[in-house]
């Protein structure tokens, strides 16, 4: 569901002439950092142990969720402008 929400908001706030560039850029950013994150996770697991690495992941996941819960995006009801 969140993919649909993100894509809808992105398409509504981005001018039509820039949609391809914005979608391409975000795709590279989101999909391109996966290998970097995997490498970083492996380095942390090797340095501190797998249990510590898992706890770091848990804290990071909760921090990301807390950021979204307390962001202004939560109160967004309508999107103006754009295409």
Image: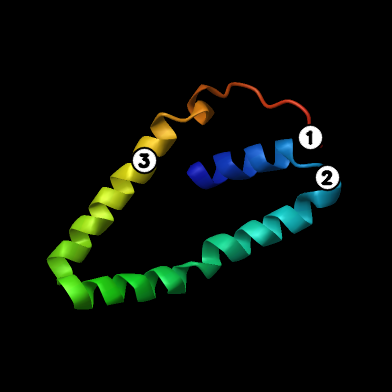
Q: Are marks 3 and 1 in contact (CB under 8 Å)?
A: no
Separation of disc 2 and disc 1 at Cα?
A: 7 Å
Query: Which residue is the extreme one toward the right?
Result: 17
Residue visible at 78% across and 35% down?
82
State whether residue 14 is above or below residue 47: above
Which quadrant of the structure image shows residue 44?
bottom left
Q: How many marks?
A: 3
Residue 82, numbered circle:
1
State whether residue 34 is above or below residue 67: below
Residue visible at 31% across and 70% down?
41
Q: Residues within 10 Å of mark 1 (few under 14, many from 20)?
A: few
Looking at the image, tell me whether mark 3 or mark 1 is earlier in sequence order. Answer: 3
Percent from the top left, x then y, of residue 20? 77, 56
Separation of disc 3 and disc 1 at Cα?
A: 27 Å
State whether residue 22 is above or below residue 66: below
Q: Which residue is mark 3?
A: 65
Q: Are marks 2 and 1 in contact (CB under 8 Å)?
A: no
- The reply, left or right, for residue 29 in relation to residue 54 is right
Mark 3 secondary-structure assignment: helix
Residue visible at 53% across and 66% down?
31
Q: Residues within 10 Å of mark 2 (few under 14, many from 20)?
A: few
Q: Which image quadrant: the C terminus?
A: top right
Q: Which residue is mark 2?
A: 16
Residue visible at 25% across and 49% down?
59
Which colouring convention does the figure follow? rainbow
């Amino acid at each position: 569901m969140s993919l649909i929400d993100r894509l809808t908001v992105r398409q509504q706030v981005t001018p039509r002439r820039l949609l391809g560039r914005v979608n391409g850029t975000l795709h590279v950013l989101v999909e391109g950092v996966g290998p970097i994150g995997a490498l970083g996770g492996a380095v942390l697991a090797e340095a501190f142990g797998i249990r510590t690495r898992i706890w770091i992941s848990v804290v990071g996941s909760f921090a990301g969720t807390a950021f979204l819960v307390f962001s202004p995006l939560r109160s967004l009801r309508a999107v103006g402008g754009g295409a």
